Structure formats: C-alpha cells, structure tokens
Image (cartoon, rainbow, N blue to C red):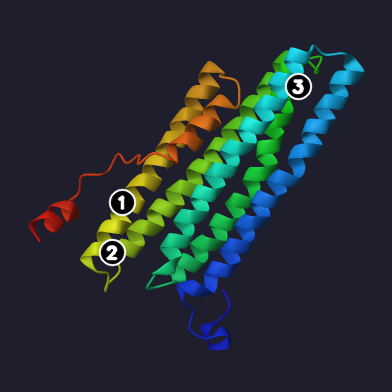
C-alpha cells in the first residue's frame, strides 16, 4: 500500500471514486459484450438452421443472465460503498477493497463462459454434449464461488467495522444488519451453486435466484443482542 506520509491520511472517501470507477467498468464490460454474444448466436442460428424456438431460448437465457449478474454486482457495489463511507480504521479496508475489486473483475469473464457453454447446449452446437456439460458445470461453480466470496468478504468487513472503537449504538446496529444480509446472501449463493451443480439445473435460473434475493430483506442473522439493547433504550 502507498505510505500515508506520501498521500496523507486516508479516509473512506479516498476509496469511493476508485470503487465507483471499477464497478462501473465491470458493468460496462457486461453490457458491451451483450449484443455481440446475441448477434453471434443469431448468426450461428441462421448458418446452421436452428429452430426459432431454440434461438429464442438462447437469447432469453443470455438476457436474463445479464440482468442477474448486473443486479448482483450493483448490490455488491452498494454494500462496499456503504461500508467504506464511515469506516474508522482503514488498513484492513484498504487490503479488502483491493481483493473485492479483483474478484469482482473476474465475474464478467466467467459469466460469459457460462453463457457460452449454456447456449451451446441449448443449440446443440458441440459434438460432445457430455464435455460441454462438464465445462458448464465447472465455470458455473466458479461464478457462484466468486459471488459468494464477495459477499463473505463484505460480511467480514461489516464485523470488523462494527467492533471498531468509537462506533455509535445506531451505527453498530446498521452494521449488524449489513453483516447479516451479506453473510446470508453469501451462504445462499454457495448453497444454490452446489445444489445446481448436483442437480444440473440449467442457467440462468440459479443466478436469477441470487439476483432476486437482493431485492428481499434476506437476513438469517436478524436476532442479536444489539436489537434488544436498542429496544430497552
């Protein structure tokens, strides 16, 4: 890390611009590749005379998967920014931010690998179906593990910030909610990914489940001593 005597005392605000820019690039890469993938599949459909229904299913899977990944990355950005905004001690946050941004940048390429193999199975492009299924299973697990890891890192950061000296009771309560929802989503992501791998549920249904969970106050750790303390106050 750059020494503080060179850049001055760091605050959470120093990182906001960087994380905004990085997540914006990740989301931009997703949308830039979307029409290219759709056009490639439509072109392949015309060349090989695939049934229109298969082409519609392939394009629908691509768009739904894009929506799901976009929503999840947006959710992770919101958590990350909220945690950095009021952080007190930033050494751990500086290291964690680097890892969060690195892992986030890997989601896009692996998501497109999932799309590639999923569409090949839908359109029956590959000669070896079992091989395509194996490749799809591997890259799909990687995507779920990456997303699960992002949420788990955010949960750890929320715990660290909650325990920092100087946090108010109200702030600790908010951080506990952030911890609970992030950890719940991380565990849900890993569980859904493993179940989908065992049952071989076709994309993009599984990733859509995770995306929908971002709109729901999903918290397996809602009960805590801080809630009871707040009620007494």
- CB under 8 Å between callouts 2 and 1? no
Q: Quadrant of the C terminus?
A: bottom left
Disc nearer the start of the sequence (2/1): 2
The answer to whether residue 131 is visible is no
Q: Residue at x 35, y 41 (%)?
A: 217
Residue 64 in the image, given as x and y percentages of width and height: 62, 31
Q: Which mark is residue 102?
A: none
Q: Quadrant of residue 162?
A: bottom left
Q: How many marks?
A: 3
Image location (x, y in percent) of residue 220: 30, 39
Q: Return the residue at label 3.
A: 120
**Callouts 3 and 1 close, C-beta under 8 Å:** no
> Pointer 1: what residue?
177
Mark 3 or 1, closer to the camera:
1
Is the residue marked by circle 2 packed among few (<14), some (14-19), or many (20+) residues within 10 Å?
some
In this view, the residue in front, 55 or 106, is 55
Location of residue 49 with respect to 175 vertically, above or below: above
Quick one: SS at disc 1? Answer: helix
Considering every residue shown, the one lying at the far right of the view is 47
Q: Secondary structure at mark 3?
A: helix
Marked residue nearer the N-terminal end (3 or 2)? 3
Describe the element under mark 2 as helix, strand or loop. Answer: helix
Q: Nearer the viewer, residue 209 or 179?
A: 209
- Identity of the residue drawn at 32% across and 47% down: 180
Query: In the image, which disc is placed on residue 171?
Result: 2
């Amino acid at each position: 890390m750059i020494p503080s005597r060179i850049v001055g005392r760091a605050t959470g605000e120093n990182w906001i611009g960087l994380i905004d820019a990085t997540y914006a690039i990740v989301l931009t890469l997703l949308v830039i590749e979307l029409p290219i993938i759709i056009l490639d599949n439509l072109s392949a459909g015309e060349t090989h005379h695939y049934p229109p229904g298969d082409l519609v299913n392939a394009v629908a899977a691509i768009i739904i998967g894009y929506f799901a990944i976009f929503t999840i990355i947006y959710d992770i950005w919101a958590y990350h920014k909220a945690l950095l905004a009021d952080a007190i001690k930033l050494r751990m946050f500086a290291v964690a931010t680097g890892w969060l941004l690195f892992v986030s940048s890997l989601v896009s390429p692996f998501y497109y690998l999932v799309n590639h193999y999923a569409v090949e199975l839908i359109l029956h492009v590959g000669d070896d179906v079992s091989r395509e299924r194996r490749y799809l299973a591997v890259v799909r697990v990687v995507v779920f593990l990456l997303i699960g890891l992002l949420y788990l890192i955010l949960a750890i950061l929320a715990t660290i910030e909650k325990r920092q000296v100087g946090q108010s009771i109200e702030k600790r309560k908010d951080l506990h909610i952030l911890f609970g929802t992030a950890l719940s989503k991380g565990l849900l992501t890993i569980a859904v990914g493993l179940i989908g791998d065992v049952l071989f549920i076709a994309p993009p249904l599984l990733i859509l489940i995770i995306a929908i969970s971002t709109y729901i106050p999903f918290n397996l750790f809602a009960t805590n001593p801080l809630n009871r303390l707040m009620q007494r106050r």
